[in-house]
Image: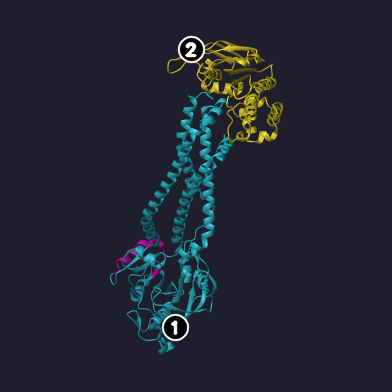
């Protein structure tokens, strides 16, 4: 039956190619959207590991996660260093790494923190941050950059740079104090690749003499070496990553921080916040999926319609086969084989197309969005989805196959 | 006996009933079924081939009584024991001459076992009918009427079915070509195992057959 179905397909190549094109595009779209979603989820899930709690101002946990971990949006509020130090003293907390955000450099976010950040913050399970070259910052004017920053800007160890006040492109430049790159981090596939790290003291230093977002006194008029070290410790920070000595006390510690009476702070569990985030994104994802399934449904309808339309012109062909001993079941099988072939070819083309598109856009996507899509052929889940589509096509093709069956039963050999 | 029909009748949904004469056909025999247009020649052919259900009377082909067969068994009987040649040859347009000829083996295991080498058998039959391998490779639209007719003959004969049914096979041919076609068809069959029924409205074919059966008496 397959060879006859193939020959029949060859004879009606153009309309069948159009149907294959429609089915391939819709299936490729479904696969692509799913892979982008999975890559985004993986990217988010792998961005932060080894952190039990994120401490920040009281408010939305998702928002705190977005601007601290994923560098999306702007911090809404700060917490005082005093509160941070007080909470960090809790014996249940093993380590605490503060971060202060606000400045940028050529579109890349500047994160001020301590050098402990590079030891404590992990990604993709339990992988620690590695230096591709150089070391962590030690001095006030030293800076560590992510791999994507180094690639995009062509910076290496020793490159000098100024930081822009604020995160917008139009911010005022801190051009009275230059930083020097001392380390470049190895790629992680997380937002860390797109970040610039300076010490809390260095960050505080460039903001000395700034009031209400404008520079009042230039650092050039000051003797930096004479500034007392404690004066350079920031009064406020944006957030802090906390590691507990035992994860058993996670909820208790989170509750006690949330009930902290001296300042409105909160502690969020990263996994919980991410789950909340996905539940919000989930409805958009469902809408996308629904749209995709509709497109696939239209493709299948087009395929069945084409087959049914062609039946009229194929009456003679079916009659000839009947004279040769083909049963109505044989004829229906030919129709089913044709539709299986069309769907199968579309599946193979869709998988190939998505792989090709992934291969072409993998670096571009990573650079533009920070999302790194895995270059794979097909997952078991995708195979099941595509199998379901082929099955739906086959079920739908029972209509024309049934028509052939019925018609051929009542048809004679009139020449 | 290859074929035997007794008191065969067929009633259309309009109520019109056709009565067909009894036919007995032995191996090597050629019968001409003759009758005017609309006399029921095609209906007779459809009944003999098992496509139309046998309403009344009996048909026995190579010992198989149609009444005792299911619809599927009748299809198989047709595939195994009957080769059909149409007036318009009915070749599948997207298959080559060779593939069209080979189609007859697709639905019959029995006919496949009668052919040890498909390619050689088709070539041998083709050569006997004056067709070259180049013509066999062509699609029907690139063939002449005569060539299409010969492909249809090869398809009907391949695998040695017991009964060859031909429906107005010479209607497009002149008298000389008609005689040549009948000679080639007769020469190509095995008289010890095969027999031929040709349906036509042309009485001039009579001398080319062993017997003539007239149909077309409506009641």
The mark found on residue B218 in the picture is 2
Shade representing chain B: yellow
Q: Which chain is cyan?
A: A
Q: Is B72 within the magenta? A: no
The answer to whether one can see residue A253 in this image is no
Residue visible at 48% across and 70% down in the picture: A119
Is residue B103 shown above or below B197? below
Q: Nearer the viewer, mark 2 or mark 1?
A: 2
The chain ID associated with circle 2 is B
Identify the element where label 2 is drawn.
Answer: loop
A395 left or right, relative to A8: left
Residue B36 in percent (x, y) is at: 53, 16
B83 left or right, relative to B120: left
Q: Nearer the viewer, residue A398 or B8?
A: B8
The quarter holding residue B110 reads: top right
Is residue B201 shown above or below A224? above
Q: Which residues are magenta?
A: A240-260
Identify the element where label 1 is drawn.
Answer: strand
The chain ID associated with circle 1 is A
Is residue B2 shown above or below A365? above
Residue visible at 40% across and 52% down in the picture: A288
Q: Nearer the viewer, residue B99 or A345?
A: B99
List the residue tagged with mark 1. A177
Residue A169 in percent (x, y) is at: 41, 74
Residue A56 in percent (x, y) is at: 35, 69
């Amino acid at each position: 039956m397959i060879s006859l179905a193939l020959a029949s397909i060859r004879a009606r190549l153009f309309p069948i190619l159009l149907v294959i094109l429609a089915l391939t595009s819709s299936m490729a779209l479904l696969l692509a959207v799913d892979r982008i979603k999975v890559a985004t989820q993986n990217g988010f899930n792998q961005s932060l590991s080894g952190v039990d709690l994120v401490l920040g101002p009281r408010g939305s946990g998702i928002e705190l996660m977005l601007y601290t971990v994923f560098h999306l949006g702007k911090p809404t509020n700060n917490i005082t260093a005093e509160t941070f130090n007080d909470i960090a003293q809790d014996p249940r907390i093993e380590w605490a790494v503060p971060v202060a955000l606000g400045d940028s450099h050529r579109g890349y976010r500047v994160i001020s923190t301590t050098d402990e950040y590079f030891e404590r913050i992990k990604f993709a399970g339990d992988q620690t941050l590695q230096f591709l070259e150089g070391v962590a910052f030690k001095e006030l004017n030293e800076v560590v950059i992510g791999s994507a920053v180094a690639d995009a800007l062509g910076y290496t160890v020793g490159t000098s740079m100024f930081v822009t006040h604020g995160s917008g492109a139009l911010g005022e430049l801190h051009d009275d104090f230059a930083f020097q790159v001392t380390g470049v981090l190895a790629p992680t596939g997380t937002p860390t690749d797109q970040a610039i790290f300076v010490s809390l003291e260095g960050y505080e230093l460039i903001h000395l003499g700034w009031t209400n977002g404008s520079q009042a006194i230039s650092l050039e008029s000051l003797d930096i070496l004479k500034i007392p070290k404690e004066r350079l410790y920031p009064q406020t920070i944006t957030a802090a990553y906390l590691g507990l000595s035992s994860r058993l006390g996670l909820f208790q510690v989170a509750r006690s921080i949330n009930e902290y009476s001296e300042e409105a702070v909160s502690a969020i569990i990263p996994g919980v916040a991410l789950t909340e985030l996905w539940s919000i994104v989930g409805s958009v994802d469902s809408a996308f999926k629904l749209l995709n399934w509709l497109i696939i449904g239209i493709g299948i309808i087009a395929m069945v319609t084409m087959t049914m339309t062609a039946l009229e012109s194929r009456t003679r062909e079916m009659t000839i086969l009947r004279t040769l001993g083909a049963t109505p079941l044989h004829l229906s099988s030919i129709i089913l084989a044709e539709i299986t072939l069309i769907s199968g070819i579309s599946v193979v083309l869709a998988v190939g197309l998505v792989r090709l598109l992934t291969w072409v856009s993998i670096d571009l996507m990573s650079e533009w969005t920070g999302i790194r899509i895995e270059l794979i052929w097909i997952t078991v889940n995708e195979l099941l989805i595509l199998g379901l589509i082929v099955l739906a096509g086959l079920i739908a093709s029972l209509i024309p196959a049934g028509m052939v069956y019925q018609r051929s039963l009542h048809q004679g050999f009139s020449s | 006996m290859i074929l035997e029909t007794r008191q065969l009748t067929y009633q259309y949904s309009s109520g019109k009933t056709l009565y067909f004469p009894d036919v007995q056909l032995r191996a090597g025999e050629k019968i001409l079924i003759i009758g005017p247009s609309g006399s029921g020649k095609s209906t007779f052919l459809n009944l003999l081939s098992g496509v139309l259900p046998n309403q009344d009377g009996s048909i026995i082909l190579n010992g198989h009584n149609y009444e005792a067969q299911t619809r599927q068994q009748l299809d198989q009987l047709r595939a195994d024991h009957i080769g059909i040649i149409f007036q318009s040859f009915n070749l599948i347009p997207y298959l080559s001459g060779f593939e069209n000829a080979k189609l007859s083996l697709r639905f019959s295991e029995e006919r496949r076992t009668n052919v040890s080498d498909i390619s050689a058998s088709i070539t041998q039959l083709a050569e006997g009918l004056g067709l070259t391998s180049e013509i066999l490779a062509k699609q029907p639209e690139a063939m002449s009427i005569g060539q299409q007719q010969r492909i249809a003959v090869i398809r009907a004969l391949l695998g040695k079915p017991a009964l060859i049914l031909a429906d107005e096979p010479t209607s497009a041919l002149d008298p000389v070509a008609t005689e040549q076609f009948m000679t080639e068809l007769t020469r190509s069959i095995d008289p010890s195992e095969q027999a031929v029924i040709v349906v036509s409205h042309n009485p001039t074919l009579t001398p080319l057959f062993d017997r003539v059966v007239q149909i077309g008496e409506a009641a």
